[in-house]
Amino acid sequence: IGPDPGHFHRRPLYPNQKCLVVLARCGALSCQDIPGGEEAVLAHLRRLFRRTRRYHDIQGVELALLDHFQLDLSQMESEAKELAQVLLSEIGNVDNVDYQEFGAQLQLLVALLRRKACDWWQLSLEQLSAMHGVLKLSRRPQLHVEFDAWAHPWKLSREEVMNCIQKCTIKGTSYAQILCSLEHWQLTSC
């Protein structure tokens, strides 16, 4: 999609990145439908990940495109890890908190981290503890539950996971915890 020529005494219009998501979804596009294929999509996403953008835009565009084209985050590992480090450092810096973006920042970080196992990210214990503390104090209990389940999939033993699947009666267990523990224990059949 080329830029709007900008005739009629108005500023030129450029396609919004969110248009790409709508176009990909509504057109049921796959990587093969894009000139350059999967490499072109990955190159575009790498470029987007490196740009400074509002956090809700990243979640609405980059992660949505990753999901739509069914791309693995490990295909752009350095960009993903760099973004996670930037988000973690900004969350830890309470002096310069932009409260308008703070909620989107937390949501993006949890959504990004959950795409890979905890050990893939190679985060320090201090970073995980800081994130846990910030989420615990935030007014977003669901994000805290999702992060805690992702960061501690071993909290439930293999037997407890099987019991949850069979009975779903263990008090205080979230579905996010069950799913992350299933992945951790590699339980694929009951």
Image (spheres, rainbow, N blue to C red):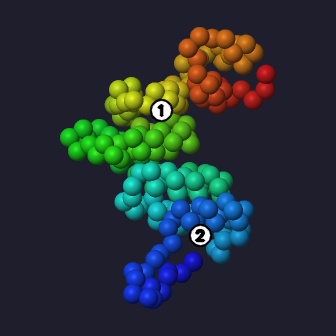
Q: Quickly name the residue at label 1.
A: 143
Q: Residue at x 73, y 13 (%)?
A: 167
The quarter of the picture where residue 53 lies is: bottom left
**Disc 2 on helix, strand or loop?**
helix
Give the side of residue 159 with respect to residue 77, left or right: right
Residue farthest along the front direction in this orientation? 8
Label 2 environment density (alpha carbons within 10 Å; few <14, some 14–19, many ≥20): few
Whether residue 111 is visible to the viewer of this picture, yes or no, is yes
Residue farthest along the right direction in this orientation? 190
Label 1 environment density (alpha carbons within 10 Å; few <14, some 14–19, many ≥20): some
Q: Quickly name the residue at label 2.
A: 40
Of callouts 1 and 2, the N-terminal one:
2
Q: Is residue 33 above or below residue 152?
A: below
Whether residue 184 is visible to the viewer of this picture, yes or no, is no
Residue 116 versus residue 96: which sits nearer the camera? Answer: 96
Q: Quadrant of the N terminus?
A: bottom right
Residue 80 versus residue 1: which sits nearer the camera? Answer: 1
**Disc 1 on helix, strand or loop?**
helix
Q: Quadrant of the C terminus?
A: top right
Residue farthest along the left direction in this orientation? 95
Residue 177: % across, % down: 58, 24
Residue 59: % across, % down: 50, 51
The circle drawn on residue 35 is none
Amino acid type assigned to the residue bearing label 2 in the image: Ala
Q: Is residue 102 above or below residue 189?
A: below
Query: How far, Cα to Cα, is label 1 from label 2?
Result: 33 Å
Residue 121 versus residue 57: which sits nearer the camera? Answer: 57
Residue 176: % across, % down: 59, 28
Residue 84: % across, % down: 42, 46
Q: Is residue 5 above or below residue 179?
A: below
Q: Is residue 178 above or below residue 79?
A: above
Q: Residue at x 52, y 53 (%)?
A: 60
